[in-house]
Amino acid sequence: MVAALLATGCDGPQSALAPASLDAARVAELFWWMVAGSAAIWLAVITIGLYAARGRPRSERAGRRLILVAGALLPTLVLGALLIYGLRLMPSAHDQEADLRIEVVGEQWWWRVRYLRDDGGPVELANEVRLPRGARAEFILSSPDVIHAFWIPSLGGKRDMIPGRITRLVLRPDRVGEYRGACAEYCGGSHALMAFPVVVMEPAEFDAWLRAQAAPARAPGEEPARRGQALFLANGCGGCHSVRGTEADGVIGPDLTHVGSRLSLGAGVLPNEPAEFARWLAHTERIKPEVRMPAYSMLAREELDAIAAYLEGLQ
């Protein structure tokens, strides 16, 4: 029963022990070797303890030999072997060859994501990463405020995002699916509410998705969404957020050009649904403590619903 419960923690969209790439598989393999090495050292220490608990050894020389072998030599050999094995894995994590480059900026408390294309300008979105299966993606990581850490456990190791510095991480996903990334460095009051979905797609599907993300926002068609766009601009939302193809050109907050097509809201805090859009607009501080976006609880429910309809329509 205990083993079954422990095994459930080895799977899931945010498990380093459920690898979906070669780099993550190597990290998981190193983990299991470290578990085996730790078990060997633990058995050696327990053996010494049991031997000593039996009372006076048959000879002082035998006792010294046991302590030397089990207490010093064995741990040194095991830890040395694990160190060498771990160092051998490091060159692959710094592979310079990449098929795709993505800038990710960790901010309090969300992710600015920018795809750098050779055949066009950059494509910016937020709080979501999509990758083509089998392609090496280079993440160019930075932060404007505090130290964050970019980590997608099922795809590879983590990297710190340090103000004033650029760090890099190369990942090559091998399995289509949806995974979960997170900030792995405490960065403030909403650190635990700073996640992002990661979707690994077939290459052709990814190319179509990226082309759609590069397009400007479509004009709202139905009346509630049209009214919502007017309210969005009238209440100053465009001063912080950008919606390409409209007057909204803010650069402080997340780009909302295609926010309706994303899998979550608020960096993984809420599902992407119209009711949750309205809830987020009215109660941002309550949902995400210390968030820098003001709440719009002064708006009438009908106005919040109209803005939510507009944002949900930004597909």
Image: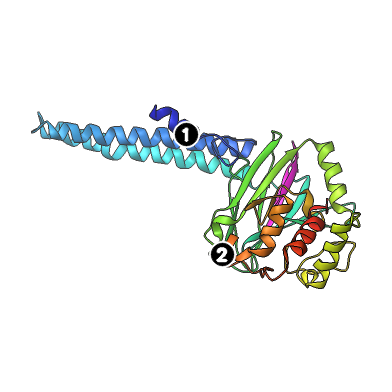
Q: Amino acid at mark 1?
A: Trp
Q: Amino acid at mark 2?
A: Pro
Q: Please tell me in which quadrant of the rendered image residue 190 appears.
A: bottom right
Question: Mostly what secondary structure, the magenta segment?
Answer: strand
- Position of residue 20 measured from the top left corner of the image (x, y, whole percent): 64, 35
Question: Considering only vertical position in the picture, is 103 above or below 42?
Answer: below
135 inside magenta stretch = yes
Q: Please tell me in which quadrant of the rendered image residue 245 appears.
A: bottom right
Q: Please tell me in which quadrant of the rendered image residue 68 appears.
A: top left
Q: CA distance from mark 2 to mark 1?
A: 38 Å
Task: State the SS at label 2.
Answer: loop
The mark found on residue 32 in the picture is 1
Q: Write down the region rendered in magenta.
A: 127-141
Task: State the SS at label 1.
Answer: helix
Q: Which one is in front in this view, the residue at disc 2 or the one at disc 1? A: 2
22 inside magenta stretch = no
Answer yes or no: do the residues labelled 2 and 1 have beta carbons within 8 Å? no
**What residue is shown at x 18% (from left), y 32% (from top)?**
50
Q: Earlier in the sequence, mark 2 or mark 1?
A: 1
> In the rendered image, which residue does mark 2 sit on?
289
Q: Residue 2 vs residue 112: left or right?
A: left
- Position of residue 123 measured from the top left corner of the image (x, y, whole percent): 82, 56
Q: Residue 90 vs residue 116: left or right?
A: left
What colouring method underlies this structural image?
A: rainbow
Residue 105 visible in image? no
**What residue is shown at x 89% (from left), y 65% (from top)?**
246
Dot 2 alpha-carbon crowd within 10 angstroms: few under 14, some 14 to 19, many 20 or more: some
Judging depth in this view, the residue of 212 and 147 nearest the camera is 212
**What residue is shown at x 83% (from left), y 38% (from top)?**
205
- Position of residue 124 measured from the top left corner of the image (x, y, whole percent): 79, 57
Q: Residue 20 vs residue 313: left or right?
A: left
